[in-house]
Image (cartoon, rainbow, N blue to C red):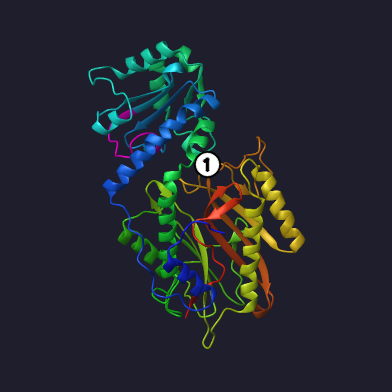
Amino acid sequence: MNRWPVPCLLLALSVACATGRPAPTQPETPRLLSWSEQLAVREAWLAKRHELLLPMMRRHGVGMWIIVNEEFHDDPLTQYVAPPRPYAGIRDVFVFIDAGEQGLRKIALPSYAEENLTRFFEVPEETRVYKQVLGELYKQYQPRTIALGIHGKRAVTHSLTRDAYAYLVEALGPEAEARFIGAAPLIEEYLDTRIPEELEHYRTLVVLTEQVVKRAFSSEVVKPGVTRVGDVRRWLYDELGRRSVGTWFQPDLRVQRKGQTGGTSRGFLAVSREDVVIQRGDLLHVDFGISYMGLHSDWQKMAYVLREGEKDVPEGLKRALANTNALQDALVKASRPGRSSAEVYETVMAEMKEKGIQAQVYSHPLGNQGHGLGASIDFRSTQRKEEPQRLRAGSYIAIELNTRTPAPEWDGQEVFAMAEDPAYLTDEGWRFFVPRQEAYYLIP
């Protein structure tokens, strides 16, 4: 389903897994950029993003947008509206103004003036009192609305602190306070809008995620009867450090085995204890993500530990994964730009009911956050009271879902086959950044 070019070595890996043979030695990861190179690329993205901002502000009726970054309390928006560099000042303020025919005015009021800021913002002389500058801007433009990080349901949309709010009221005046509105709709569109320049860097991130997980689920790391769940988790942490990348959540592992049903948590298969020893015949699952270039991946894959004398996965387990692939197919087929997430979810679940597949769907946006803003295709889609969220062309998503299938080889015990793959939305539906998993990774 992926129409983009994929390195031949990665295709060879996919073929090896599909044939049931252990994967060959991993190819070298595409070169990751140094920190200074990342800054240069991300600041080029920032210029493109600023070009998109004024039409967004007008669509959402925003005359002025203010983001306040504070020492020890960085606003999560700062690295996406300003150069993604450290900010150590007590308070840094970023102001975007719809100046009518003049276009978009961008003013930075930093505690410490820095050369790179002046490439993107007007920066007043340090001798100016910034409260006065804010007051003057308000009087000059008289914006009908002033959007702030308040009232939103997600932390990135209600990040303004009480003291920062009081600072703005004092600077702008009580008349301006009456014009304060929540910036959530603007923030959501801004963060859910991907630019073309990001795509190949995000693909590199996904390729890296896949390679790390394949190594974690291989005989390099897993020794049946010896390796514990906690050992694999610690290896993943150490590998992140070795690669000089981060993560945005703790890697989770789940172990399923014949005759031993795992517990559940919030309706899902529960994470396994760290002292669980991985045995032959186990079905392993990992939930893992990497942070790089201000972007985040989210990735779930499964592996099977071969029993003595086994050369392949039992047919019942294969059928479980095939059902999950069918669920992925249904979601991709039903998704188009402009369709509501509720409509997509209902269409997918109706198809699963017709096919007799027990399914759960809990897919969510990806990009600048791991659990990003935008349209989530999940079981909550039909329960939300507000206007249904609509899919936006170019958005990234984690196609996250599972099916439960009885396995004859496990005496009819239900097997969870869980998957999560980053994808981007085209006019023909979602496209995976790298080929999805259609066969379990094998651990000999």
| Residue 58, above or below 338 | above
Give how far across and how far down residue 126 sits, in percent: 23, 21
As drawn, is 291 to the left or to the right of 113?
right
Q: Is residue 415 visible?
A: no
- Per the image, is 301 magenta? no
> Residue 114: horizontal and vertical position, in percent?
24, 31
Identify the residue shown where x is 57% and y is 59%: 1
Left-right relation of 247 to 347: left
Q: Is residue 82 magenta?
A: yes
What's the magenta region?
A: 80-92
Give the total number of marks visible in the rendering: 1
- Three-letter code, disc 1: Leu
Residue lying farthest to the right in this orientation: 354
Residue at the image point whose x is 54% and y is 32% from the top: 185
Q: Which residue sits furthest bottom?
A: 309
Report if residue 172 is visible in the image.
Answer: yes
Q: Quadrant of residue 244?
A: bottom left
Report which quarter residue 98 is drawn in: top left
Q: Position of residue 71 (x, y in %)?
A: 31, 34
Residue drawn at the location 55% of the way across and 27% of the way down: 59
136 lies above or below 308:
above
Is the residue 202 above or below the residue 140 in the image? below
User: Which residue corresponds to mark 1?
Assistant: 373
Q: Residue at x 58, y 63 (%)?
A: 418
Please indicate whether residue 405 sits to the left or right of residue 367 in the image. right
Q: Secondary structure at mark 1?
A: loop
Majority secondary structure in the magenta region: loop
